[in-house]
Amino acid sequence: MKKLSVIAGFAMLLWTVLLACSKETAKPDEPETEEDPITTFFKGEVRPSESLPCFNGAYYRKVVSSKDKWLGIGGKVVLPQITFDENRKNPNKPGQYLDNPSVYLGGNMNGQETDIGLTWEVIRDENGNVTADRRAFRPFLRRTGYSATGQQAAYENAPAESLYYWYPGDEVEISIQVLENKKIRFVVAGEGKRFERDFDCDGYNLSSFGEFKRVNAIDQVANEGKPVQPTQTEVTGAEWKETHYFRLYEGEVVEAPVHSQRFTDMRCPGRNHFRVTASDDDLLIGAETIDISGAGF
């Protein structure tokens, strides 16, 4: 009996030691790491379409969001260099071409489409005369009509003043944001200049679902809705440093990076007309360099 008691005591001692060691080496449960929804995905965020149909009439690279609770889009871009096709001059406007570069943003809410940004335009020279040829990027705003309220389609440019001219190689910040119901704020700023305009758009509301886009294009005069016209024009070196969507999150409007899973990649009319380059880091923040060639690469 005494021997059994000793064995039992030893076993109990061993178990106590093992239990103590177990308590000393065990690690407490660590909380799961939560991803930042601003830089990844918001809860319930609608994913973008894998592809969308092209609209005829221009050579363009479009980055377009899903249809969701977005409130706008913005970014920072270096404006491109332009080489025109000398065989495509506009017979009705000597000094101008039938191809026209643009860098712009836009959206669609409740069926109302907007295109808002910079287009290659005529200017007033130092003597106040309107130039025959286009010489600088100037801000423009366009909306389609909105039948629910009877709002008419509209198009306007920033004033033809040197304060609102930007040139190839200039770096600008550009954005459009739903400011309040029926109103968009457009801002473009850079190189010591700034243009800001609140634009009435009855289809745009803080509570509506909508999609927003970023576009680099070679537009073609009087060619909307038609097949693109062959051209040797090239628009190269446009560099987006970053792109973001605006969205209401926890009571504040935040800037959500347009990473590679947050947009539909459109290159119209075909991918061979575009050279788009981006590093892994660029893909996280909506950055890329874009070259466009009418003849193709």
Image (spheres, rainbow, N blue to C red):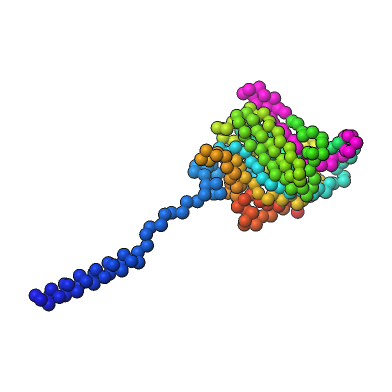
Q: Which residue lies furthest to the top in this view?
A: 150
Residue at horizontal 62 percent and vertical 56 percent from the top: 281
Tell whether position 144 is magenta.
yes
Percent position of residue 257, x then y? 60, 47
Horizontal relation, residue 208 to residue 101: left or right: left
Question: Where is residue 270 shown, x and y percent of the image?
Answer: 70, 47
Mark yes or no: residue 229 visible. Answer: no
Residue at the spot x=88%, y=34% of the render?
128
Is residue 82 shown above or below 13? above
Q: Which of 107 and 252 is in front in this view?
A: 252
Residue found 55% across the figure and 32% down from its top: 207
Residue drawn at the location 62% of the way across and 53% of the way down: 283
- Quadrant in which residue 13 is drawn: bottom left
Instruction: Write down the quadrant of residue 103 in the picture.
Output: top right
The image position of residue 208, as x and y in percent, is 56, 32
Is residue 11 a member of the stretch shown in magenta? no
Q: Give the range drawn in magenta.
A: 125-154
Q: Is residue 55 left or right of residue 165?
A: left
**In the displayed image of the protein, which residue is found farthest to the bottom?**
3
Q: Where is residue 66 in the image (x, y as percent from the top left)?
A: 58, 41
Q: Which residue lies furthest to the left in this view?
A: 1
What is the quadrant of the C terminus in the image? bottom right
Magenta span main SS? loop
